[in-house]
Image (cartoon, coloured by chain):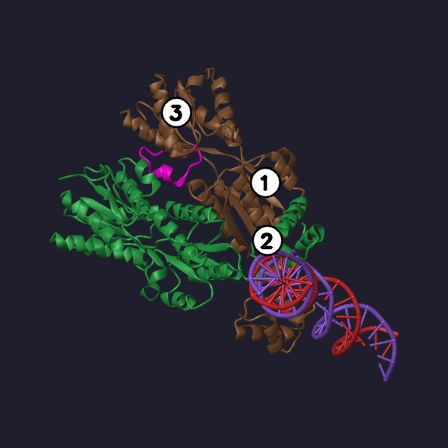
Chain colours: A brown, B green, C purple, D red
Amino acid sequence: MATIYEVSALAGVSLSSVSRVLNDHEHVSEKTKKKVAAAMKELGYRPNTIARSLASSRSNSVGVLVSELHGPFFGSMLSAIELELRNAGKHAIITAGHSDEENEIKGLEFLIDRNCDALILLVDAISDDYLIKLSKGKTPFVILNRNISEIRDNCFYLDNELGGYLAAKHLIEQGHKEIAYISGPLSKQDSTERLIGHKKALVEANICFKENLLYEGDYLTESGREGINFLINNKTTFTAIACSNDEMASGAMKGARDHKLLIPEQCSFIGFDNAFFTEYLYPQLTTIHFPVADMAIMSTHWILKHVYKQKELVIKNMFLPNLIERQSIQQY
Amino acid sequence: MATIYEVSALAGVSLSSVSRVLNDHEHVSEKTKKKVAAAMKELGYRPNTIARSLASSRSNSVGVLVSELHGPFFGSMLSAIELELRNAGKHAIITAGHSDEENEIKGLEFLIDRNCDALILLVDAISDDYLIKLSKGKTPFVILNRNISEIRDNCFYLDNELGGYLAAKHLIEQGHKEIAYISGPLSKQDSTERLIGHKKALVEANICFKENLLYEGDYLTESGREGINFLINNKTTFTAIACSNDEMASGAMKGARDHKLLIPEQCSFIGFDNAFFTEYLYPQLTTIHFPVADMAIMSTHWILKHVYKQKELVIKNMFLPNLIERQSIQQY
DNA sequence: CCACGAACTGGAAGCGCTTCCATTCTGGAT
DNA sequence: ATCCAGAATGGAAGCGCTTCCAGTTCGTGG
């Protein structure tokens, strides 16, 4: 691989000049620009990212740390971020934290140690305090799916409570009164907020929330199935199940069918997230749309604005869910 | 951030010694090891990855280039790779090529320029020749989902032809004779191989393959729908549709329903890949299982073995598909 | 025609580490 | 006590680039 040194020799200029044209500095004459460009081309020169990064402590890349690399939610998020950065001439370095504190911290350090100019974090095991402390550090970052008031401006999140509320309200409007709820892990902020919204809608309609209609899952399909089994085995009665994400809803629907329940006649379902596959379930799943991609793009814009100094980017931190009506709900 | 220099000063040893304990070299006394470790701890020292990488041209990380970051296929692949590397104490640097030659090459150079010790490539726009030339270069790599005979040992792939064959054969065994086929882009090796297998099964059963029962899609759900619309609008008759991936199958199923067709009574479906959501479709989709994760893990093993010199890893390059019977096929 | 500030260029230090080489230190054999 | 191979250590160069500073060139106004 050719180095800047060989380029400078071939072009007959100094190292500094080559570096200057490489970095598009001002105060370089057209003549040397041309000479250098020609030399670079002739040698097939490609700058050594690592060396640049070491010398300048910049890297033109932003680190992305997500819980998992699979699943529709993370998938669309990663895609959106990568594309937005790519369009801005920046790179994404992606890694996973697996919702485990040690791994998340390792991931974080990996990215920081790689001189990322900024970070996009979707972490749930790392504590608020740790993140607040991190915000005093050198590497700027944004947080997705989480709202920490001390660093509010760096947080991008959905109004989860509203989402939970909308889902329950819709079921109630369709005449449902006995509504079960399959939740994500209640240790996670989004899960609890969605449940709060759910309860709020019940209260407004004078429906009492029954603890035995609540099942705490883990956001994975299988736990949706476990949830409905739990509900049925406990001999509870319900006409509808609200799920705090689409995976669990699809698992629960499958479980319902195993129990010979007709959907939606005997049991209605509403999901959350509006993952791509909800449209392909049968019946198509009514759900709450989470504008994941929008949120991901917005967080990227924050970085483009604050770190890479792009102008004219308007930032908003909270996103609003909305109801997507399909065919998984029976009307009474 | 503390540097190796400060550590050496505090420990009262030389830079070289610190470096040696950092890299676990032989010929370091227990005493200095202890002193250095203590100093590192006291200073909260974290080695600067970039500097190490520049000085040693190694990075303990492998670059992963995939077509897209979303979708069940890539999702499970990335997850499997990342986990396997993590367990080996290595890192993954992930980026996307978007099935576009220019982007793929940029992605490739990005990873190489970051001093990745090796690469895992899932690319479809880059030519065989380019890859063969690349294999003469300094950075070792493996290729997924593609079989290039000149660099056969670096390729990991499914026996796609067998997969296509198994799918068609199963349909035929269930009594189907008029079988439509919704294919992926025929510019891609996997698509064409699957189609070849499909045709082979037809030939074996003395069924003539009809060109007007073939639709070339793009592996995305929407094109499955377009496929069935095309077939129906052309007034072709068929009792089953074989699809070359699950997304298109689910799209086609939805399209079938829009046309008021009963599944599987009036139209049977078989997919390919066995993506997680096929189990949650209704009726559950019969499909061909592609052991993506196994393949991803195996490719990672190749790297662990050849680049990081781990012993006792057995490598195989070709993976076999198998039939997953569910409920989307009518028996005659 | 000279002076002077701005534009341009080159030299050299240094980013934090690895690694080669030379030097010093061991301890076991004599 | 002496010798010597091998272990342990330190010094210094260098990975490829950026960036500061100083020096040179240029164009313009007086």
Q: Within the magenta stretch, is there residue A274?
A: yes
Per the model, the C-alpha gap separating discs 1 and 2 is 44 Å
Per the model, the C-alpha gap separating discs 3 and 2 is 55 Å
Foreground residue among B164 and A115: A115
Judged left or right of residue A316, residue B260 is left
* Quarter of the figure with residue B76: top left
Q: Residue at x 19, y 55 (%)?
A: B199
Which range of residues does the magenta coloring cover? Answer: A272-285
Q: Position of residue A159 (x, y in %)?
A: 53, 32
Q: Are marks 3 and 1 on the same chain?
A: yes
Residue picked out by circle 3:
A241
Q: Residue at x 39, y 23 (%)?
A: A174
Judged left or right of residue A187, residue A248 is left
Residue picked out by circle 2:
B22
Q: Position of residue A290 (x, y in %)?
A: 47, 37
Question: In the rendered structure, the residue with mark 2 lies on which chain?
Answer: B
